[in-house]
């Protein structure tokens, strides 16, 4: 079988099946966005890595090295934020053609450094290697989280409210403008969605405030798409979910791009990916308190978009009364070997 | 300026120059083979990463995926061994064409798992991404080391004996056989040098025994070549070194390959690279004790090959009385953007 037939999650499943039992020091291991490790200190160690590959994740003509550096760091910071952690140390493994300008490399690192500094972290090591076909940056981020504050994908309970920070779908709208730069979109909306695509802001303070509150049962950052990541929470929690379409936060900027492109903005909101918003489950009775603490901590809003259900593994979107669609991994979401399926 | 003109160490120097001051939690930071981090626990965290890129570090037709997996893990274990650490957790960031057989990927991971298991460590996370041009495996290894046992590159003192475990140059002899398979070499020698090239054994027990002994002032694993790595020790220690050619351990197997190839085996011993032996400095009066403890801990031998000197940054090889060569990074050693220079 080929990797493209197995798909990203099929491949990860095969890898997971052949690994030995995880040592007892591993609180969260393979299959999650982060590993959580007991280093015998007062806090757990959080470790994550994510690669940006030229021609797959970015095109060199579309993003300058500084912004590429910031984004590379940001997507990893987002993973640490989603467990309530504090980023500390980064390793950068860079593979590049030897015909690359050193300026490009230096600006890439400047971007990573600035994004890390804003998150209280720093580059402490790494590696450089030659890669003839293009640039690949592998970014490894280590952080800390107090055991009492750790929030995982697992832990959502039937009846919980499902909440999300900010507006998913905007990054996907930005991608549409990259692909179709000729679309006529008001300048402000154009700039907003492009910034969301090229310069995502990880929800670090929000993640930490949510984790410290003790009110959040399960959390993930939305990188694969709202529904795909919600499905991760459901699978890990042994639960299902129901999203109410009319409650979804739909950004006017994303709407204007979708309209001009002749696309359904709801698809982008549900399955766009690269949103780096936090998606979490909590008691519905705590929703007001959570909105207030997010506003205090980061001036951020959040939206209640549905409920966790007892129908294990089933993620359903209620479009309007009596009209549902059932999410399955085959028809929606983002798979790195399958591309966007929409 | 292009990366190929700056060279690997020039590029790393430029990157280091633009990084902010390292946080106080960083015991060893950018520029070393490992980062050593204070995680507020009883032991320091050791973190290292190293990439294996198809077409640069390996050719798919020359090494099977299981051995590639073992080697990928082994070179990182060697880095942790060189500071006296104990490997614990690995993250694997894999970038592959989607036309790769899943069998290949599974055997790669089996190799990594087996090598890690032998070192007491396990894969706990990672990432998979698409890379159209070939396979790139980025391997991140985390380990622990007691602060009292940490041994670094810095710390060598003028007058120290320079010692090395085992026979450098054999891996380079194996590479020669890969390039020139028609060379007529006795079977045993052929198998030995090929195994040293494709299946290096990290000196983990040796590194830990040396570190715990408290007798070693500075240590590094030989990946770039004996002289290049000795130069790293000298630079970090503000010292120089003098190697006596007649004391160098020259493997009969490597000699037979060099002879058949019409090459000077001394070049391979001094600059071959990928040896994964431990090179260290200690009081000459402790040399016998060190040999004994290495024999007890791992049944391993070691050789005293020269002296640390006070001539900062100068690495000199005494070929015979009155005939010296001076090592400089420009003429010897391994540079990932320049290739082997010999």
Image (cartoon, coloured by chain):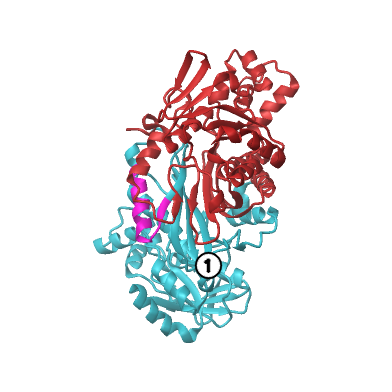
Chain colours: A red, B cyan
Residue carrying label 1: B42
Residue lying at the far left of the rendered structure? B187
Direction from residue B163 to residue A292 in the image, left or right: right
Give the image location of residue B81, x and y in percent: 45, 65
Give the image location of residue A204, x and y in percent: 64, 43
User: Quick one: A200 or B274, which is closer to the camera?
Assistant: A200
**Residue A149 showing in the rendered view:** yes
Q: Which residues are magenta?
A: B106-123
Q: Secondary structure at mark 1?
A: loop
**Residue B177 showing in the rendered view:** no
Give the image location of residue A39, x and y in percent: 50, 59
Q: Chain of mark 1?
A: B
Dominant secondary structure, magenta:
helix
**The image quarter in which residue A189 lies:** top right
Residue lying at the far bottom of the rendered structure? B285
* Residue found at x 69% / y 35%: A300
């Amino acid at each position: 079988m080929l990797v493209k037939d197995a798909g990203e999650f099929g491949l990860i499943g095969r890898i997971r099946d052949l690994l030995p039992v995880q040592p007892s020091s591993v609180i969260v291991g393979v299959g999650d966005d982060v590993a959580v490790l007991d280093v015998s200190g007062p806090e757990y160690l959080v470790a994550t890595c994510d690669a940006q590959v030229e021609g797959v994740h970015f095109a060199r003509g579309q993003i300058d090295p500084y912004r590429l550096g910031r984004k590379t760091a940001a997507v990893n910071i987002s993973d640490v934020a989603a467990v309530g952690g504090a980023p500390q140390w980064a390793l950068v493994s860079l593979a590049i053609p030897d015909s690359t300008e050193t300026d490009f490399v230096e600006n890439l690192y400047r971007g990573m450094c600035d994004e890390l500094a804003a998150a209280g972290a720093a580059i402490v090591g790494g590696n450089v290697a030659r890669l003839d076909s293009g640039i690949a940056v592998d970014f490894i981020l280590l952080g800390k989280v107090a055991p009492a504050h750790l929030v995982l994908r697992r832990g959502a309970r039937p009846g919980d409210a499902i909440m999300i920070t900010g507006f998913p779908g905007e990054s996907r709208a930005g991608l549409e403008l990259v692909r179709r730069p000729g679309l006529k979109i008001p300048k402000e909306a154009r700039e907003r969605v492009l910034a969301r695509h090229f310069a995502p802001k990880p929800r670090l303070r929000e993640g930490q405030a949510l984790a410290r509150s003790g009110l959040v049962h399960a959390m993930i950052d939305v990188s694969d798409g709202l529904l795909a990541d919600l499905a991760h929470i459901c699978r890990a929690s042994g639960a299902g979910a129901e999203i109410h379409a009319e409650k979804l936060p739909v950004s006017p900027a994303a709407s204007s791009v979708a309209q001009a492109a002749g696309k359904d903005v709801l698809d982008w909101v549900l399955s766009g990916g690269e949103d780096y918003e936090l998606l979490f489950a909590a008691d519905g009775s705590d929703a007001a308190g959570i909105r207030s603490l997010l506003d205090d901590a980061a001036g951020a809003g959040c939206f209640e978009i549905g409920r966790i259900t007892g129908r294990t593994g089933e993620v359903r979107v209620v479009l309007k009364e009596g009209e549902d669609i059932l999410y399955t991994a085959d028809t929606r979401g983002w798979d790195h070997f399958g591309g966007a399926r929409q």
